[in-house]
Image (tube, helix red, strand yellow):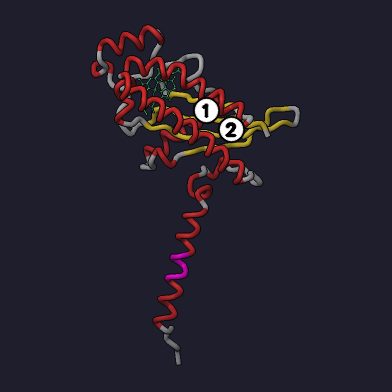
Amino acid sequence: MLQRPNPSTSRLSTLFTLCLLCFYSAFCPLAAQADESATPAGIDSDLVLSTRGIAGQLLNQLGQKLKAAMSADGPIAAVSVCKEAAPAIAKSLSAEHGVLITRVGTRVRNSNMGVPNAWQKEALAKFEARMAQGEKPADLEYWQVVDTGNGKRELHYAKAIAAQPQCLACHGQPQDIAAPLAEKIKLEYPNDEAVGYIVGKLRGAVVVTKPL
Ligand code: HEC
């Protein structure tokens, strides 16, 4: 005679499987977020976690500075804060963690610092493609260990940055940017291309290069 599974046992085992799945997705964000083709065997997940942390610090510190400057002195003064604070924060985090960290744009305001190199362009293209598939920009990151010759290797890491409502004062549609602010931006950045963004679209990435 065929034995029917005990319903309470089978419910328990379903629960157990669900728990395992939850545990896996909660504690294995690397598996969930990494672009698998870019995750070479043997990459140390601690390394990626700490690099992600450094990228997060840049976004937090700069976000706080920008917010404070915008509400204290308004967007025109905040342009100068951005101009000084962004490179200063990047420099101090780079020195503190022995990495090179910066921001790059899909279109660029600061043509000295913000232009993506070939690897960073590839990362941005992957983010665009994944967003077109419905993935949220906040979850997107991409990394690779790159051989730089002479037996040296570097971790290349990128974290997507999406345009948010508070960014549009300075990166929104040109006709929506207040005239005095637009003039200030033009004065500081005559080759500015970083306008025309809408909320939720890819603005750029925080990129970290770490010698291994
Ligand atoms: C007060 C105006 C202002 C606001 C608001 C603003 N930015 Fe910018 N943004 C700038 C300036 C100025 C630069 C150039 C900074 C520099 O010289 O490094 C810049 C540069 C950038 C860059 C680096 C790439 C490039 O184009 O040079 C990124 C990425 C960026 N901004 C994203 C954002 C995001 C995301 C927000 C919203 C959270 C935002 N910005 C809000 C003024 C602003």
Q: Residue at x 61, y 26 (%)?
A: 95
Q: Which residue is mark 1?
A: 120
> Residue 132, located in which quarter of the rendered image?
top left
Q: Pick out the residue farthest to the right.
A: 150
**Residue 191 part of the magenta-drawn span:** no
Cα distance, mark 1 to mark 2? 9 Å
Q: Earlier in the sequence, mark 1 or mark 2?
A: 1
Residue 196 visible in this rendered orientation of the protein: no
- Point out residue 38 in the picture as x, y percentages from the top left corner: 56, 40
Q: Residue at x 58, y 32 (%)?
A: 156
**Residue 18 part of the magenta-drawn span:** yes
Q: Pick out the residue farthest to the front.
A: 72
Q: Which residue is mark 2?
A: 156
Q: Amino acid at mark 1?
A: Gln
- Point out residue 206 in the picture as x, y percentages from the top left corner: 49, 30
Image quadrant occupied by the C terminus: top right
Image quadrant occupied by the N terminus: bottom left
10 Å crowding of disc 2: few (<14), some (14-19), many (20+): many
- Point out residue 152 in the picture as x, y percentages from the top left corner: 72, 31
- Point out residue 21 in the picture as x, y percentages from the top left corner: 47, 61
- Residue range in magenta is 15-19
Q: Residue at x 44, y 27 (%)?
A: 62
Is the C-beta separation of discs 1 and 2 under 8 Å? yes
Q: In what element is the residue under mark 1?
A: helix
Q: In what element is the residue under mark 2?
A: strand
In the image, residue 21 above or below residue 172:
below
- On the picture, is 53 further left or further right than 5? right
Q: Amino acid at mark 2?
A: His
Residue 105 visible in this rendered orientation of the protein: yes
> Between 5 and 85, which is closer to the camera in this rendering?
85
